[in-house]
Image (spheres, helix red, strand yellow):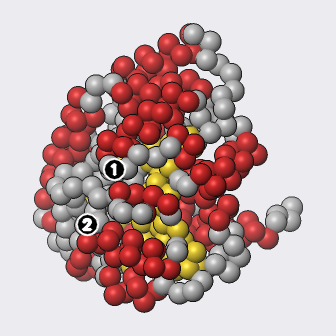
Amino acid sequence: MKFANRMSRLGTETAFEVMAKAKALEAQGKHIVYLQIGEPDFPTPKHIIDAGVAALQAGETHYSPAAGIMPLRQAIVEEVAARRGVRPEVDEVVVTPGAKPIMYFLIMACVEIGDEVIYPNPGFPIYESVINFVGAKPIPLPLREEKDFRFDPDEFRSLVTDRTKLIIMNTPANPTGGILTREDIAVVADVARERGILVLSDEVYKNIIYEGTHHSLYSLPDMKEQTILLDGFSKTYAMTGWRLGWGCMPKEIARRVEQLMINCNSCTATFSQYAGIQALQGPTEEVDAMVEKFRKRRDFIVNGLNQIEGISCILPKGAFYVFPNIKQIGMGSQELESYLLHEAGVSILSGTAFGKYGDGYLRFSYANSVENISIGLDRIAQALAKL
Ligand SMILES: Cc1ncc(COP(=O)(O)O)c(C=O)c1O
């Protein structure tokens, strides 16, 4: 079978492939500790499940408008107004099956062959994949460990050219757990305004933050007109399987994204959207408790990793990932990922799964119990001691 050329430019999310390898080992009887998965291990809060079930039972089993049901879009308007201090119009909101399609549709709609797109590296792998897929040029913006995995402003400015069409930012970040400061986003906004460049601000982890404050590019003066705010329900409300996300963007872009929705999905599952209203408007205690549990796990895993010879790990301020430095171990990140899976039965990801600047690091997700994290760390220490 000869596939279309463009498929050779499409990347992937290695997390799903590593998961398949780990499951295959498990099927052969090996015990695996899963520390690679990017989703909360908590159940979706009950009031949200109840709202989804009630919608199904009330007959909400049909297509919805392509851009989403009006009450959910209105709830998103209120959420953005409350959290970002800027009120979008309801026509500027598009609901999608997960937040991922917003990045795909936006890049499909706005980025031409040969355009340049600046994106964080190490960063969520789908950015680079889709930039390549549309024939644009990916321009990696290195995130530096010595800067708590933030970027250097001069380095950022040096990457901007007349061909820069889009800048992608992600705070709190996958895979590093780093957050951007007010000064960082101001630098991006200044350049974007000066040069008329679009910004995609991926804020899916905005509620999972332990120190500091979440700063949104969407909130900065005049940035609403050139920012695509991407957010969703997967991480905050433990709703990965409901496939529910959204974007807020200037109207003319929203209509293109809606058109792509019509071509691909028709709409987002209607009952999921009703559950989403409840997520935004219902009680927040369970989400708060989840974030508190994540904080304890973060402290536990960072402390544990720093006790293993050859590993050093800074304390991330957000999301549920740590990105330890393994350069002292003397093994490449990918080799170490494979060694730890087979030797220790611990499934983690090589930093290179997130781009070339992830070399020398591993990504651990602490969306697992303290007990399992503890078993995983012990086994890693034993496996490394054998080297
Ligand atoms: C940075 C980032 N953005 C977006 C997403 C997409 O989430 P979803 O499509 O489940 O809403 C993820 C998921 O891992 C992510 O890590």
Q: Amino acid at mark 2?
A: Arg
Horizontally, is 180 left or right of 93 in the view? left
Along the line of sight, the residue nearer the viewer: 68 or 100: 68
Horizontally, is 225 left or right of 146 in the view? right
Quadrant (top left, top right, bottom left, bottom right) of the C terminus: bottom left
Please, is residue 259 above or below residue 11 in the view? above
Q: Amino acid at mark 1?
A: Arg
> Residue at image x 28%, y 62%?
179
> Residue at image x 44%, y 32%?
75
Say which mark, if any, is on residue 182.
2
Q: Which residue is mark 1?
A: 84
Along the line of sight, the residue nearer the viewer: 235 or 180: 180
Please, is residue 356 above or below residue 277 in the view? below
Is residue 382 visible to us here? no
Residue 22 image position (x, y, % from top left): 47, 50
Residue 62 image position (x, y, % from top left): 68, 22
Instruction: Classify residue 172 by image quadrant.
Output: bottom left
Say which mark, if any, is on residue 259.
none
**Secondary element at tag 1:** helix
Give the CA separation, mark 2 to mark 1. 13 Å
Quadrant (top left, top right, bottom left, bottom right) of the N terminus: bottom right
Residue, far right: 1
Q: Is ligand 1 closer than 8 angstroms to the Cβ of mark 1?
A: no
> Residue at image x 32%, y 49%?
85
**Nearer-N-terminus badge (2/1):** 1
Is residue 50 visible to us here? yes
> Residue at image x 62%, y 56%?
253
Q: Residues within 10 Å of mark 1 (few under 14, many from 20)?
A: some
Instruction: Classify residue 3 by image quadrant.
Output: bottom right
Instruction: Classify residue 371 by image quadrant.
Output: top left
Horizontally, is 283 left or right of 293 in the view? right
